Each structure stands twice: as structure tokens, then as C-alpha cells.
Amino acid sequence: MRPVRAAVWRRATATCAAGLAALAATSPAAAASHRVAAVDPDDQLARALEVALSPWDATVVQVHIETPGATMPIAADRARSIASDAHADVLVWVSESDGGHALWIYDVASDHASARTLEAAPPFEPATAAAIALAVKTLLRGTVVAPPPERFGAEVVEPEWILGTSIGAATRFTTSSLTSARVALHASLWPAGLGHRWGLSVDVEDGPGPEARSDAFSGSLTDGAARLGLGLRVPLAGWATLEPSLGGALHLLTLDGVVLAERASVSVRRLDVAFEPRLGLDFAFLGGRLLVGPWVGATVLGRWQRFLVHDASVVEAGPVGMEGALRLALAMP
């Protein structure tokens, strides 16, 4: 029994490791910070741009050089050169012409410059600078600086199904705390009729249990579980979702080992029910199709589990435990 469980655990761990490695390879590109270069902005505008673009994880850099001006196509040519030197995705500047001022944005990806007339002239008041920064943010929704779900014309993935796997650890509070690694498979359904907000989830978990030893016995305790939950997805931003859930689970606790004096193998199985609330946080990548994030939860078994061999306690599993894991999942619309 124990070699079989060990082989299953090794295969499951390898699968999770491969998934996490794939995430590590893809997520930096998906979450890379884009650069917005502002040409010689005044202090208020520079500060307002940093505040406005911080939720997008965009880096605002200041370039103290003569602005590209307001005459096309010379302005676009100069903006292209300045953006290249600054390694920026977008260049922002304020031009002056015939006594008026304009806000300019040059997008490197499209090689396009656009302008909006300004009613005020620098140096800007804080309220005016904030309004200009919001105007810049609106224009940037058509560029790579904006996260995919917030770009003009973007379609945010509303998952109907979420399929994934997680790897983590669980601790059960007893006379001596029992800690073990856990691996799980996850599937959840979020019907369109409920706004993709309320859904049902199924999780199947297993993992190598802690050692169970005494003067007469040597073995380990394994806790396999199947959980059914009711959850709610609460969007925090275009790239993050909070997911609280309440669930019930059926646990199969298995004690495998050897009675040392008799050199006899022992396998004891017990079923128990549990109440399992959880709280998860998903971060979206690849337009919301790849989800990754941590979750934490509690497990409350129906009773205290004590395993005896020759009337001597070899391991105890208390009714209350905590669990946490990192989940990697795919969202299917």
C-alpha cells in the first residue's frame, strides 16, 4: 500500500511542478511592467502620472530634454527617437504653439502620435495635473501599457469552467501538530445565469502523511479528501478576483505501517466528514485565461481521530486543521 501511495504522490508532485514551471516561464512576459516616458513634465504632472498609472504596474520615467514640439511629422520623428533612447513604450509631452498648449502621446507599437488641446498652461495646479493624468490614462487604453482586460475593445474572460491543480501544506492541531504536504485537482462551474459570480467547486486532495511511530509501531498517516463547495467570485480589479467559499468534505484517513514485534503489516482506514471554509485570491494572466493565486482554509472534522496499536496510541488527528496552497488553473469561457 505505502509504495503505491508514494508512487502516486511522486507523479502528482511532478505534474504540479511542471505546471508551476510553465507559469514561471509565461507570467513574467504577461506581467512585465511597461514604461511611459514623460518629456520634462512639471512636478505636479509627474506625480499625477505616477499615481494614475500605478494600478497598471506601469513605470513612469522623466526625460529632461527639449520636447518634440507640435509640428508634424517632425514631432513624430523626434518622439520616435526619444522613446527609443528611453526604452519607453509611450512618450508623453506638452507642447506650446501660437499661445496654446496641447497634450501629446506617441505610441511606439503603432508609430502614431495624437494630441489633445489643453485649457491650462504649465506649471499645473494639482487638480489640473490630475485631470491631465486621467486623460493620458484614457488615451493609453489603446496601447500595450494598459492591461489586456482594460484596453479598448478588450473582452474580459468570464469563466464558465475553471480547471486546475494546487500544491500546498496542511497542519492539524493535536497533542503534537501534524503537518503534511498536499496536492489537489480542482474543477469549478460558474454559470452564466448567475452572472459567473456564484458557482460550485469540486476538489480531490491527497498527500504523504506525517510519520506515526511508537515503541511497537512504525508507519504513516495519509489523509485523502473529496470536497464539494459553494463559492462567490468578487472582482477586485481587471486582474484580481477574491473567491470565498463554504464546503463540505469526505476524508479517508489511512494508517499504514508495521507492528515491529510481529513484523506484521497494518492498514487501518476511517471515513469522516468535515466542514471546510476557504478564501482564495486569483491573479489573471493572458487576458484572464490563466489564473494563479493562493488560497487558505480550515478543516473541521466530525470527531477526534485516535489510532491505537495494541492499545497504545501511535498517532492522533485532531478535529481542527489549517491548509494553504498555490493554485494554477485555466479559465474556460
Image (tube, rainbow, N blue to C red):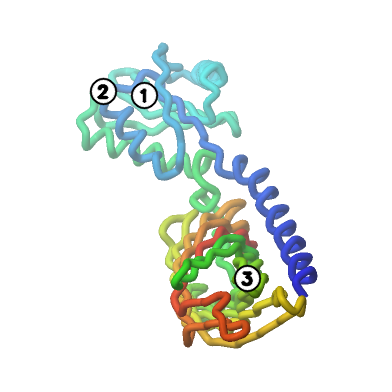
Element marked by disc 1: strand
- Eye-nearest disc, 3 or 1: 3
First reached walking from the N terminus: tag 2 or tag 3? 2
First reached walking from the N terminus: tag 3 or tag 1? 1
Give the residue at mark 1: 94
> What whole-number distance in Å separates the C-alpha atoms at marks 2 and 3?
55 Å
Compared across the picture, whether 125 is left or right of 300 comes to left
Residue 187 drawn at (x, y percent): 63, 73
Residue 100 drawn at (x, y percent): 30, 23
Q: Is disc 1 surrounded by few (<14), some (14 to 19) or many (20+) residues within 10 Å?
A: many
The reply to whether residue 211 is visible in this rendering is yes
> What whole-number distance in Å separates the C-alpha atoms at marks 1 and 2?
8 Å
Give the residue at mark 3: 186
Residue 26 drawn at (x, y percent): 66, 45
Q: Amino acid at mark 3?
A: His
Residue 240 drawn at (x, y percent): 47, 56
Q: Are marks 1 and 2 in contact (CB under 8 Å)?
A: yes
Q: Residue at x 47, y 32 (%)?
A: 114
Q: Is residue 37 above or below residue 228?
A: above
The reply to whether residue 232 is visible in this rendering is no
Element marked by disc 2: loop
* Residue in the foreground of this view, choosing between 301 and 239: 301
* Residue in the foreground of this view, choosing between 318 and 168: 318
Q: Is residue 45 above or below residue 191?
A: above
Q: Are marks 3 and 1 in contact (CB under 8 Å)?
A: no
Give the residue at mark 2: 122
| The N terminus - image quarter | bottom right
Q: Residue at x 62, y 40 (%)?
A: 29
